[in-house]
Image (cartoon, grey):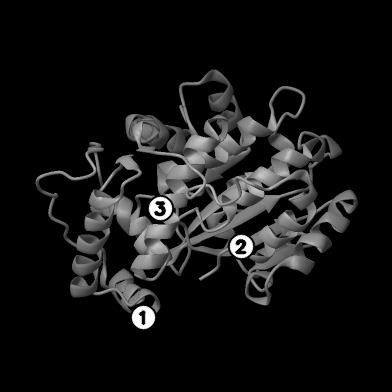
Amino acid sequence: MTTTIDLNKAPESYAPYTFTLSDKYKIMAQDELREDDDMREAALKQFREWIAKHPLIRRCRTDAPFLLRFLRTKKFSIPAATEMLEKYLTIRQVYPHWFFKLDINDPDLEAIIDSGYLFPLPERDEQGRKIIFSNGGKFDTNRFTSAQLIKIHSMVLEALQDEEESQISGYVHVTDDSELNVGFLGIWSFTDIRNLAHCVQNSLPMRQKENHFVNLPSFANKLSEFILSVLSEKLRNRVFVHRGWDELKTKISPQLLPKEYGGTVPMADMIAQFKKQLKERRDIVLALDDMEIEINKSTIPWADSTDADIASGVIGSFRKLEVD
């Protein structure tokens, strides 16, 4: 895993890459992503040449773990991976209040992590996937903003996305909605929804495999029904709404969950372990703020959108959510 960051977009040489994961991931990469040693080497070479020649990219990571985020998400399609990187760099600069200063030493961000709102489970599932656990009721809507909520999600993902096991096998999200309150929905403005919808279109390099929502309160039912109605069939098939934890445990091994939900490791221990990882990755995550792309209308395709476009844009964004 990368331990230092070089943002020179055209270095004289690149660190050699060796695939070090087990045969389980090697086979999965071949079967699901068309990845082998020759494909990977050729794709990294093309990707790096594209970055070096890009007239608008000023500074960017070009190490293999970073670029493989995009290549694996896009199953080694160079045009699709380069488009995703371009938008990833763009949204970070256009919305710095969501994607910059993802610092675990920020007292507010640390407090949100400590609350148990969002953290990954230590053990992967049988398919090698990383499980990200969330409890909506732990987010203090009287103290924190929607911008801080998005920053937490961004910080957690940036701390995890160089893990090659997850790049190959993907992610599962489990959300405990039993304590969700109306205030959670009240912190979002229509502008937030519009801009976030633009951001999630084809810009986040992660293979999202399943989303599980447990004990969704009645006031959120209409919203969930609307979201499901505009998703593609493929994505709908990856969204599961459970009436209780027994239902979830038919999909997720109880042993993987925090002790409070039937597992063996207390939630506080899981959070402490993840915070240690966040501290170790802090400099690498913060260095992403120094990446730079020149912003213009060609890199911001939604620049000319108006308020009249918002409603259709939001719905269109849901329809275009990326699945692999």
Q: Residues within 10 Å of mark 2 (few under 14, many from 20)?
A: some
Label 2 vs label 3, nearer the camera: 3
As helix, strand or loop, the secondary structure at mark 1 comes to helix
Q: Which residue is mark 1?
A: 31
Label located before the other in sequence (2 or 3): 3
Label located before the other in sequence (3 or 1): 1
Mark 3 belongs to which amino acid? Leu
Q: Is residue 251 left or right of residue 283?
A: right
Vertical placement of residue 20 versus 138, above or below: below
Give the image location of residue 10, x and y in percent: 19, 45
> Considering depth in this image, is 233 or 171 the residue closer to the camera?
233
Q: Is residue 34 left or right of residue 124?
A: left
Mark 1 belongs to which amino acid? Asp
Mark 1 and 2 residues: CB-CB less than 8 Å, in contact? no
Q: Which residue is mark 3?
A: 85
Give the image location of residue 291, x and y in percent: 35, 36
Instruction: Give the farthest residue toward the top.
Output: 107
- Can residue 168 be seen here? The reply is no
As helix, strand or loop, the secondary structure at mark 2 comes to loop
Q: Which residue is mark 2?
A: 321
Q: CA distance from mark 2 to mark 3?
A: 16 Å
Give the residue at x 23% y 55%.
Answer: 48
Give the residue at x 46% y 39%.
Answer: 295
- Can residue 202 be seen here? The reply is yes
